[in-house]
Image (cartoon, grey):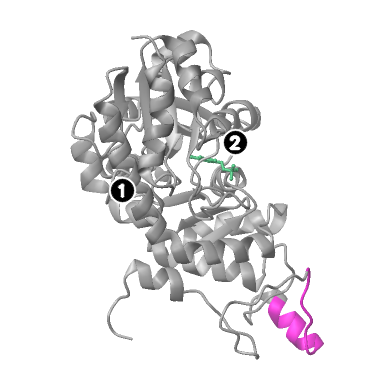
């Protein structure tokens, strides 16, 4: 084929390798190892002279199919899959950095990622400085001679702050560092960080890539040179994606485009509706013109995505009332599911921060985060209206 294929086509067609039976849906390779036809073939596989699977810690056709499909969607030379999003982030650092080097990271990143940088990688001599996701000058000022990596999520959780990926890539590159973007919230359907200058894209495949809350998975993507380091860590240390989970994720990607469009449409309707509710004091959604980085978001993302945050007057008791009044939504911190989830960040995902840290981060006790699912949006509005009617202004 001569014409480059569209993402919707890549999502259902790319990466598939058929066995001798020519199955239409992909086979699942539940095997720990692979047999060789001769000693010479075994030697050739191990030396790398001949391509092909060896042992499932680092080569499995089900995993490779998922990697190929996600690489096609992100426009990456290579993808390396992992057992979880956290394993993917760990592997990025272990594969590409060494003790004595320095990371500059957004302050608004996933809680376990903060713990990983501070409490685990810190013990092995990798130091991290946390800065504002929205102020490139803070990133520039945090650079040291040993800075090797910039790390961010955009939009951030739960406040949906949007980082200027292009501007931060330029600052990183001018100072000999790589930019890694955790693209969990947008997926390649809404945002392709490599095209904006990022060097590395990371996914928690557990979220939208699966999209149905079934399995854990992760991935790191980038050029062949960088991914060789990440792959070497996988091969040696073994935080491997299972064949079953890879198969589920590979199929999940087939509906990713449809789902991301539907999540975004529902989220925009819900955010617009929330803005008109008297008991709601603030709505944060990148697709709304009132969002502080709306223009930037619309430049680097196709839509505002599926995550909406809002504040109610009356602090924690009012927020809990809204959450407890829901009958359709799931009260859980997970996101990226067909089912809408609702969470109170200050008492759950961000409860380990001190009140001062939460105040600095802009997470107040009236804040509620919704990961908008695929239900009819009118049912979601009614679900929130129940609790909003009861909350004190
Ligand atoms: C969930 C999540 C992770 C961690 O992924 P797991 O698959 O749970 O290990 C990393 N980053 C973001 C933005 C997430 O939402």
Residue 91, position in %: x, y?
59, 48
Mark 2 Cβ and ligand 1 under 8 Å apart: no
Which of the two labelled residues, at mark 1 and mark 2, occupies the earlier sequence position? Answer: 2
Residue of label 1: 265
Q: Quadrant of the N terminus?
A: bottom left
Residue 279 falls left or right of residue 225: left
Extent of the magenta region:
32-45
Instruction: Between label 1 and label 2, give the one nearer the viewer.
Output: 1
Front in this rendered view, residue 6 or 332? 332
Q: Which residue is found at the position 56% from the left and 71% from the top?
A: 65
Q: Residues within 10 Å of mark 2 (few under 14, many from 20)?
A: few
Secondary structure of the residue carrying numbered label 1: helix
Q: Quadrant of the C terminus?
A: top left
Kindly indicate the quadrant of the structure image that contains residue 77: bottom left
Residue of label 2: 99
Q: Is residue 79 above or below residue 212?
A: below
> Is residue 282 covered in magenta?
no
Residue 132, position in %: x, y?
35, 25
Front in this rendered view, residue 13 or 99? 13
Q: Is residue 39 above or below residue 208?
A: below
Residue 299 falls left or right of residue 9: left
Q: Which residue is found at the position 71% from the left and 52% from the top?
A: 237
Residue 11 appears in the rendering: yes
Ligand 1's quadrant is top right
Residue 371, position in %: x, y?
44, 39
Task: Kindly report the distance in space between the C-alpha atoms of the residues bearing marks 1 and 2.
Answer: 45 Å
Residue 158 appears in the rendering: no
Kindly indicate the quadrant of the structure image that contains residue 178: top left
């Amino acid at each position: 084929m001569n014409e480059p294929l569209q993402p919707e086509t890549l999502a259902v067609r790319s990466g598939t390798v058929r066995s001798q039976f020519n199955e239409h849906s992909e086979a699942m390779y539940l095997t720990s190892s692979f047999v060789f036809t001769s000693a010479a073939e075994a030697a050739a596989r191990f030396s790398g002279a001949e391509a092909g699977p060896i042992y499932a810690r680092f080569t499995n056709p089900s995993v490779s199919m998922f990697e190929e499909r996600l690489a096609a969607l992100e426009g990456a030379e290579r993808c390396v899959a992992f057992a979880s999003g956290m394993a993917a982030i760990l592997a990025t650092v272990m594969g590409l950095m060494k003790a004595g080097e320095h990371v500059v990271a957004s302050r608004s990143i996933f809680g376990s990622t903060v713990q990983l940088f501070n409490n685990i990688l810190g013990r092995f001599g990798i130091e991290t400085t946390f800065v504002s996701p929205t102020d490139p000058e803070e990133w520039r000022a945090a650079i040291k001679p040993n800075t090797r990596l910039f790390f961010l999520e955009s939009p951030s959780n739960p406040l949906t702050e949007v980082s200027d990926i292009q501007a931060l890539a330029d600052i990183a590159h001018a100072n000999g560092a790589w930019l890694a973007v955790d693209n969990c919230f947008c997926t390649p359907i809404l945002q392709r960080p490599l095209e904006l200058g990022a060097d590395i894209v990371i996914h928690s495949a557990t979220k939208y890539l699966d999209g149905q809350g079934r399995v854990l998975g992760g991935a790191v993507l980038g050029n062949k040179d960088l991914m060789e380091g990440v792959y070497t860590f996988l091969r040696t240390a073994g935080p491997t994606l299972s064949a079953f989970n890879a198969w589920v994720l590979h199929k999940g990607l087939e509906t990713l485009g449809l789902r991301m469009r539907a999540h975004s449409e529902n989220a925009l309707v819900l955010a617009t509706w929330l803005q008109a509710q008297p008991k709601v004091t603030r709505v944060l959604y990148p697709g709304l013109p009132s969002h502080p980085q709306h223009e930037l978001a619309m430049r680097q993302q196709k839509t505002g995505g599926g995550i909406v945050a809002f504040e109610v007057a009356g602090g924690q008791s009012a927020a809990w009332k809204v959450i407890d009044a829901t009958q359709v939504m799931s009260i859980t911190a997970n996101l990226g599911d067909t089912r809408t989830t609702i969470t109170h960040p200050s008492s759950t995902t961000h409860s380990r921060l001190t009140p001062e840290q939460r105040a600095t981060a802009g997470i107040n006790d009236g804040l509620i985060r919704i990961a908008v699912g695929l239900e009819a949006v009118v049912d979601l509005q009614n679900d929130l209206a129940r609790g909003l009617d009861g909350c004190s202004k």
